[in-house]
Image (cartoon, rainbow, N blue to C red):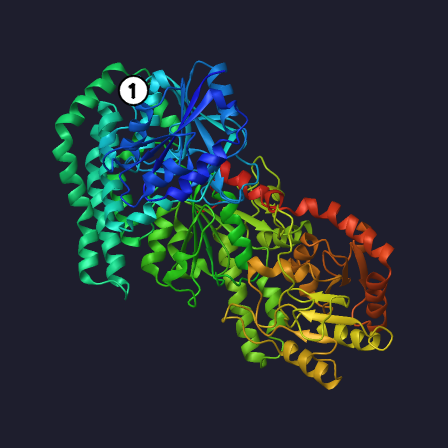
Amino acid sequence: MSKVSVILVNYRGADDSIAAARYIQQCDWKSEDFEIVVVDNDSGDGSYEKLCAELPDCVVVQSGANRGFAGGCNFGVAQSSGDIIAFLNNDARPHEQWISEAVRVLESDSTVGCVACKVLDWEGQKIDYVGSSLTWYAMGYKEGDDREDTGEFDSPKNVLFPTGASMFVPRALYEDLGGFDERFFMFYEDVDFGWRVNLAGYDVRYVPTSIAYHRHHATMDKHADQSRELFLLERNALMSMYKNYGTDLLRTAFTPALMLSLKRAQAYAQEKLDEESQGLWDSTDTALTSPYAFASFVQMLPSLKQSRADIQGSRKKTDAEIIELMGNTINPLTPQFSYLIAHEQLIDHFHVRRHFPSRSRVLIVTGDFIGDKMAGPAIRVWEMAKLLGREYDVRLCTMNVNNDENIREMPGEGFELWSSKDSRTLRAHTDWADIVVFQGFLLENAPWLRYDREKIVIADIYDPMHLEQLEQSRNFDPAKRERNLSDTVSVLNNQLYAADYFLCASEKQRQFWLGQLASLGRLNQLSLAGSSPESLIGICPFGLSDEKPVQTEHAIRGAIDSIGMDDKVIIWGGGVYNWFDPITLVRAVNAMKDKHPDVRLYFLGMKNPNPDVPDMKVAAQTVALSDELGLTDRFVFFNHDWVPYNERHNHLLDADVAVSTHFEHIETQFSFRTRILDYLWAGLPIVATEGDSFGNILEQEGIGISVKPYDVEGLAAALEALLYDEARAQECRKNVERFAQQFRWSKTLAPLIDFCRQPRKAPDLP
């Protein structure tokens, strides 16, 4: 077996380093075949003495100065004796097979010069490192960072660089390449090293079975100096590109990269200046990071020139081979609006895209409110953005006036998040995009898209707004109702006239929309040439999460007064709108309460999070009826707010049965009840009114019971059967689990994903 030396660099983190060393000692590698070298980087806080006392079986050395991560690692390697060198951040812990899996790959494949380990957060839930990417201006970033680890990245692959938090390299190659470049001090030294490994003709292999768990940035927190961090990032990116790019790419990229660095510093400074807690001095300090970075780069230029000559003189791989490993190179990384504009202008002016590949850019626009509390349309575009973000650059933009600019501080999941309230910012976003996917009123705010012959426009018409408007405005005066309906029909017609592709929620909806397309002349010899009418409209139902919900706390049982742990809970998911019939439901509960005093009905949300959605008359009527019958807060309970999207599972999993009842009208026939998907996700038996796409198949699929509209007795009987007949309820739950698989977001949005892979302009549009 090869001898492995594991290098830990400590800077004022002795407790972390001691813990890391003890975790390493639990790896399944013979103790005589590995050593742990702990380098104290001149902590000056008693760390060295504590490390010596607590780790007598490790090699503990003092570096004599704070050499940074790069210098500390090189110093540790010099004190080690292993054939294979491993690096682990001192705020990380390895899996027990961390060493064996990495060494297995290095010993079995001589083309591998470095193993990049899979790194997760400390709990093993979220991704820290599963692959690397590099922008054209040489700033590295990590694939899938901070996403849930679902096993998606569990296949080995070649990457451009590892993360210094967890990596392995043969000693001979490490020494031949000169180790980490100590001029970097910290940040991007792993990018530069992996780049040089590749240029030397070796592969950096991502090995997902060699796993470490990382607390994340514990060392940098001790520096607590954002300006210094920005300085190092800017300078080190310039050094890395200067050393490692071939001549043609360096000529293309260096000048716009330097200009972009200046713009980035200015954007950071403006952001600080805009914060009330920051003063002019802080923002000025930040603005100077880029000039100081360039000055430092120039100071190092003589030594960098020699490094460049050595690297380029012995390189074994071309820039074309390196670019294949860089991932999405046209990634701005920083979300400030003025910076994004500058980024686009620079790559266009210097023709950067001619040399660097870029992914398609998809803009998704909604008029719904985006936040922790979201209704169906917002949830739908959020899930679209997550899935499309795996293959494309994605911006999710809301035009809702109640969303403000701090929406960008929300954690996007592989996509950028924006709000746009004026035509200037909206125009910038549409100009950026190759593909625009939208709901609602985008074309009224961005009329230029109707005549754009380059961009692909996709209209999401899963919600027949004009049919919904018939019911929503039922109580308006006739003139206002007619005006609302006419305006909505006009909006929909504009979408049908202008879009290249459409999304709906069911086969019945698709036939409905084909009729409208035909009436507008969009079914013609050009649009149908070589294709069927159905190919114009993809069926993308509302979906449910690929991950099963796990209850973390009780949100109804024991959490709501008068709802006990053993009560029978019926849940009404989503809002209460005028096209629903909660009145019959409340009367059914009233009919059940004497025979079943443990029955409880819980309304999940009475107030839509989008302030633009008006208060619904039926919601007030429902509360009034419950009060009149003496049911409120005894048998019927109302959440007069809205449950956050990421907390709804705790409510759903507290229920025994889910319910959806509606009036008999045109909206029902063509609707697709999004709340039903949450019921399926939570594995709940369902009681629903006949007439819509789900109500008609409950019994056919064995997932619940359908009842006729307005049938109080029938509804009460159905609820009673699923609440108190445990065998029947259990059979429904089993069938729900089977039936739900077809509605995973990854499946329901497949037509959209497939179309974006091969987008096409509609041939009949003038």
Q: Residues within 10 Å of mark 1 (few under 14, many from 20)?
A: some
Which residue occupies 52% across, 29% down? Answer: 27
Disc 1 residue type (three-letter): Leu
Q: Residue at x 63, y 53 (%)?
A: 515
Dot 1 falls on a residue whose secondary structure is loop
Task: Out of 547 and 504, give the one closest to the viewer.
Answer: 547
Q: Left of 423 or right of it: where is 471? A: right
Q: Is residue 453 left or right of residue 737?
A: left
- Residue 140 screen position, x and y as percent: 34, 36
Asked whether the viewer can see residue 580, the reply is no
In the picture, measured across the screen, residue 253 lies left or right of residue 457, that is: left
Q: Residue furthest bottom?
A: 628
Q: Nearer the viewer, residue 280 or 748?
A: 280
Asked if residue 263 is positioned above or below residue 237 in the image, the reply reads below
Q: Quadrant of residue 136?
A: top left
The residue nearer to you, when weighing 665 against 286, is 286
Residue identifier under label 1: 177
